[in-house]
Amino acid sequence: MAGQVLLIEDEPNIIEAIKFILSRAGWDVATHSNGVDAAEVVRARAPDILILDVMLPGRSGYDILRELRDDPGFADLPVLMLTARGQSKDREMAERAGASRFMTKPFANADVLDAVRALTGA
Amino acid sequence: MLNSLAAISVAYVALLFAVAFFAERAARRGRGNWLRAPIVYTLSLSIYCTAWTFYGAVGSAARNGFEYMTIYLGPSLVLIGWWWVLRKLVRIGRAQRITSVADLISSRYGKSNLLGVGVTLLAVIGTTPYIALQLQSVTLSVEVFGHPGLPGTQGPTSTAFWVAAGLSVFTVIFGTRNLDANERHHGVVMAIALEAIVKLAALLAVGAFVVWGMSGGISGTLERIDASELGHWNVQGGRWVGLMLLSAAAFLCLPRMFQVLVVENDNDTQLRMAAWAFPLYLMLMSLFIVPIAVVGLDVLPEGSNPDLFVLTVPLSQGQDGLAMLSFLGGFSSATSMVIVAAIALSTMVSNHIVMPIWLRFTTGTASVSGDVRHVVLLSRRISIAGVLLLGYLYYAMSGGGTALATIGLVSFTGVAQVLPAMLGGIFWRGATRLGALAGIGTGFVIWLYTLYLPSFGPGVVLPDSFFAEGPFGIASLNPNALFGLDGLDPLLHAVLWSLTLNTVAFFAASLFSFPSPLERLQGAQFVNVTQAPGSARGWTQGVAQAEDLMVMSQRIIGASEAVALFQQAAREQGLDGHLPEPTPAFLQRLERELAGSVGAATAHAMIGQIVGGAAVSVQDLMAVADETAQMMEYSARLEAQSAELSRTAAQLRAANDKLTRLSVQKDAFLSQISHELRTPMTSIRAFSEILRDAQGLSDEEQSKYASIIQDEAIRLTRLLDDLLDLSVLENGQVSLNVGQGLLRDVLDRALAAASANEGERGLEVVRDPVAENIRLHTDTERLSQVFINLVTNARKYCDATAPRLTIRVEPHEDRVIVDFIDNGSGVATESQDMIFEKFARVSDQKAGGAGLGLAICRQIVVRLGGEISYLPGQGGGAFRVILPREFALAAQ
């Protein structure tokens, strides 16, 4: 049984694409497109897995992730980070911030699905 | 008898002349090593034993028993302890080319000529009676032969005059032969050494005759001594200590003793031998004093002058030959003392009184006005004659009535006043010129008042009343009982008060005064002479002309000597010619050489005249000041350099910052490009995969996803177009299509294009068509691109509920200003300077653009010869575009 996915992403077409892919695989996908209150939304929704974009309006994905990792309730939350910047230092920053997996845009749809499945153990 | 006496005297004098002459010649020919033999030095010290000792010791013994021995014990102690005082004194004398005791004091205390003059006067006053004493003794001894058994006929005689004249001639000839800086009077010293042997031999002969010829051997003599009053050991402790101290002091301070001890000294070896040999000599001299006195008192009639027993005892026994030898001994004692004293005094008078006066009257011309050497020699010769004349006059005036020993002790006490300043000067760096002046002055005045003036007898100079109840009835100023100190022996009283107050004044004034720089330099050199033979009193180099110095030196030390000296110095400096550079070291050495001829103060003044410096102290201070100035200049230069360096460093830092910023910008740019490219590509890939893989998509979905792909492809294309556009603009490769156009038309086109792109939000645009009616000569296509961008931005970013854009046109003579002002919240102040940079999107809100719009705008406007800027304080976002009306007018 697939669980709930929370997608935080500001690019409408990408949101639509991911939502489509995961929904078809049985996931319940919620979306949010603003960085400022993203952490509260995560706490409120308490998803099984979080897909987090780095470049978000209002607040960077790294900051949001750091805040979540400091919260005991979300320290173990599986987080798949997406970024359109493919440099290695972006990957390092993501790992340091506590990302469970890091994925560079553009991605293969199957990879996203596999990553979500792997991270949730589903 | 008198004739043979005269003949023998003349022969003896001729012998002395011959000895002096040959010694002098040997020294000049460089064969004079034996002249510097320690034994010669030791014998020359015997001028301490003058006629006063030769005749007077017996007299003293006849009157006061063994007291005469104190006069020998004092100097013996000084020599035995030579290591502490004499060695230092002698080394200072050699190192500083000291010419006299006055020169020593003057040199030590900052080359003060006032002190030099003071000590010279003291020495002249103290020595003149002594010279008179010698003349008197010769006269008396001659008279003894004329009137055997009846000595004591008094009054000035031609004998004294002729003796004085003869001594003048001898002293002038051998005492002022040359003026080498290394001046040592070898001839004189040799003659004195001979005289020392003669007088010792004479006294020993008379003694031996008295003991073995008249008293039947040693035991008989001892019996006789025991039988007489003299045999009673009658010692006044205070007086003995006082006399020993006094004779020790006099031994160091007497001008003639200083001459032979220090000036004529050549090396420490001489001192080492003198340390034991001279006390031995003194012991031999005193060996037969008491027997002669006892026998004289026994044999000769009551009332005979005991001062002449040495002569009268042999005469009374018919021993004419022995008496003649004895006479020669006395004659030797007298003449040697007079000769050396005259040399010493003439050096002092010449160097400290005559030369300074002569220099003053010929100021500034020392190097060119005649032969200084000649002047120095002449002044010395005249001084010698003057000193002997003074002695003769003193003898003639005083009539020679006083007991010989008394005059000697008065003289001793006078010159001993130099002792505190001398010892203080060589052992205590804190001693100052003022202290020396105060000490010597105080001692001199007290000596005059309590001893010298009273020595003429009560009522002669000082009235009787002074001695009875004190001057003007003030008992505490009684010359024989100062401050109520009554009942002391007058000599002891004077010694005690003069030396005590002298020392107190010396220390007090030294402690309360401040030494001049030169004094401190000299003080350090004197006190530290045994450790560091070097010197601190430097001449500063530069102004002195070597030729002038050469001319002057030739005149002082002689032509060949000067040439040799200069050549040697030049060689040492590595120069080929005859003239060395007037380096400080050379000037100092030259000064010392000259000091040997004319004294330290004069030499210093003469070199000073040529070198142009008033005093070394000032020069030194100037040098120090120069160094300080140089240091400050250097430090200022360093500071300037350091400032420059820090400026450069700051520039480098700025450049580095800029590079770092550029690098960061480049990174950011690449990162931005990556982001801007990847984002549409993500959508494209995702949806194309969906279209390919997903089953059962509705037509509607298929169409929607396909159009997303298309939109993103267009976005991607636009981005690439923008990038290329910007790149072309930045590289200046853009070709402008310049033509005529109305500003209003350009704005119309831009607004139409902008609203075509973005239609969903209503943006009210406020325009002023009249103002816009301006003809422009520019690339209207590119200008409209700028306007489209600005309008699009307003549409995108104006966050007002009813967005409104005001386009304000302000025509000027040669340019036009177009403002785009919206009613939104505008751009934050901190972002205003970066909005024209590439990818500089003010907010991260999705704006659809790549963030290249304003960067492209700026490039275009600059190409068109205008400028674009953010206009703060307009109540919203505001951009100002300034354009030239005529493109040609703009600097392309």
Image: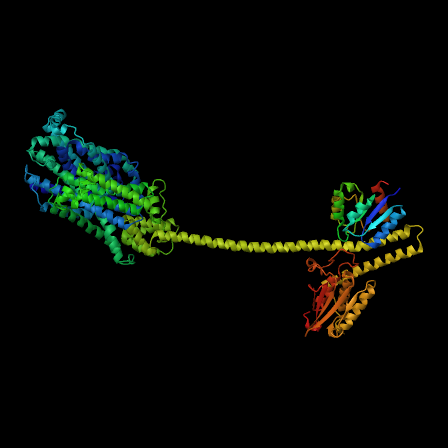
Image: B240 above or below B597: above
Q: Which of B542 and B180 is in front in this view?
A: B542
The residue lying toward the viewer, choosing from A100 and B771, is: B771
* Quadrant of the drawing holding the N terminus of chain B: top left
Where is residue B449 shown, x and y percent of the image? 19, 44
Vertical order, B484 against B765 (above or below) = above
Q: Where does the image place residue B389, in percent across and percent down from the top left? A: 15, 49
The furthest residue to the front = B801
Colouring of the image: rainbow
Q: In which quarter of the image is the C terminus of chain B?
A: bottom right
Residue B92 location in percent, x, y?
A: 31, 43
Question: x%, y% of residue B472?
Answer: 16, 46
Residue at position x 10%, y 30% in the image: B295
Going by the image, does B412 lie left or right of B630? left
Res. B214 visible in picture? yes
Residue B679 picture quarter: bottom right
